[in-house]
Amino acid sequence: MPDIHPPGRFPFFPPGKEAISFLDKTRGFWKILIFALISLGGIKQATAETFSIELMTGTAYNLPTGLSIHQAGQPDLNFTANYDTNPFGEDAPYYAYRFSLWSGDEAWELEHIHHKMFLSNPLPEIGEFMMCHGFNYFFIGHAWKRSGLIFHLGAGPIVTHPEAEIRGLKYDSEHGGLFDAGYYFSGIGAQATLGKNFYFSKNFYALLETTVTAGWAWWVPIPNGSADASNLALHGHFCMGVDL
């Protein structure tokens, strides 16, 4: 049986914590971003030496996190959700890519992780709830090379492509949102990554890395309402990269 949370609770908080305002929900993100900007502001400016492109595949393990379903005219559903990733099935695969502008041993980065989430312990009212075409993380980040390893930190928006059937009502996932393609800005996320490059030529390399992501999507459209979904996940990536 799913772990039922009392109505009005939010996912990263245990039962007993009250619902908080939009500003309170995002306050932690702004603190992280401000801290990162202050920390990185002292980095000495230098001419970029290398531009790298990395294309990744992999999978992720999702930790149990809270899910709240808000539907007009119906009581809220609040419970602890379990998600499968199913990285190579259900239409769209799991993938990621990263662009890095290196100056010495540090880089500024843009990264996209196309994470997938399939609810595996639905309540009776939920026919399906999944984001096959992405619980998409878009990160602006920074990287450091230290002792043969690469450390990455990043933060940015979450764009979801929800597919849901709640109380017999099915959501139109193919229209609306960004580009009328069913994509919606839904929240914010952050990541921390540890990786290592294995060069097999001067410019080409393979990469193994592990990533921890934390995301809060407080507005995921569903039939006649919205879902409030969080995600904590451990990712494993295999990558091919090139230095230009």
Image (cartoon, rainbow, N blue to C red):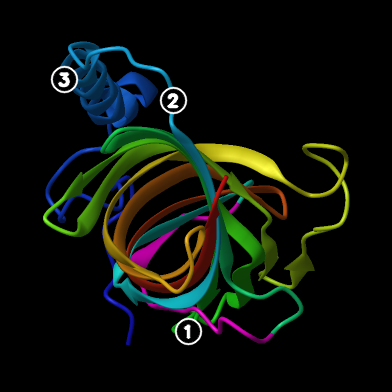
**Other-residue count near label 1 (Cα within 10 Å), few / some / many at <14 / 14–19 / ≥20:** some
Quadrant of the frame with the C terminus: top right
Query: What residue is drawn where x is 84% and y is 42%?
Result: 176
Which type of secondary structure does the marked residue at label 2 adopt?
loop
Amino acid marked by disc 3: Ser
Question: Which label was assigned to residue 48?
Answer: 2
Which type of secondary structure does the marked residue at label 3 adopt?
helix
Mark 1 vs mark 2, CA separation in Å: 46 Å
Query: What residue is drawn where x is 22% and y is 20%?
Result: 40
**Residue 86 shown in magenta:** yes
Q: Is residue 220 above or below residue 105?
A: below
Query: What residue is drawn where x is 57% and y is 52%?
Result: 136
Q: Going by the image, does 150 lie left or right of 122?
A: left
Question: Which label was assigned to residue 120?
Answer: 1
Q: Is residue 42 above or below residue 133?
A: above
Query: What residue is drawn where x is 68% and y is 66%?
Result: 164
Q: Is residue 121 above or below residue 81?
A: below
Amino acid marked by disc 2: Ala
Estimate the x, y position of residue 221 in percent, counting from the top left. 65, 48
Give the residue at mark 3: 39
Ranked by sequence position, the earlier of labels 3 and 2 is 3
In contact (CB < 8 Å): disc 1 and disc 2: no
Range shown magenta: 74-89
Ranked by sequence position, the earlier of labels 3 and 1 is 3
Estimate the x, y position of residue 181 in percent, counting from the top left. 85, 48
Amino acid marked by disc 1: Ser
In contact (CB < 8 Å): disc 3 and disc 1: no
**Residue 238 shown in magenta:** no
Report the residue that reaches farthest toward the front: 202
Estimate the x, y position of residue 7 in percent, counting from the top left. 33, 52
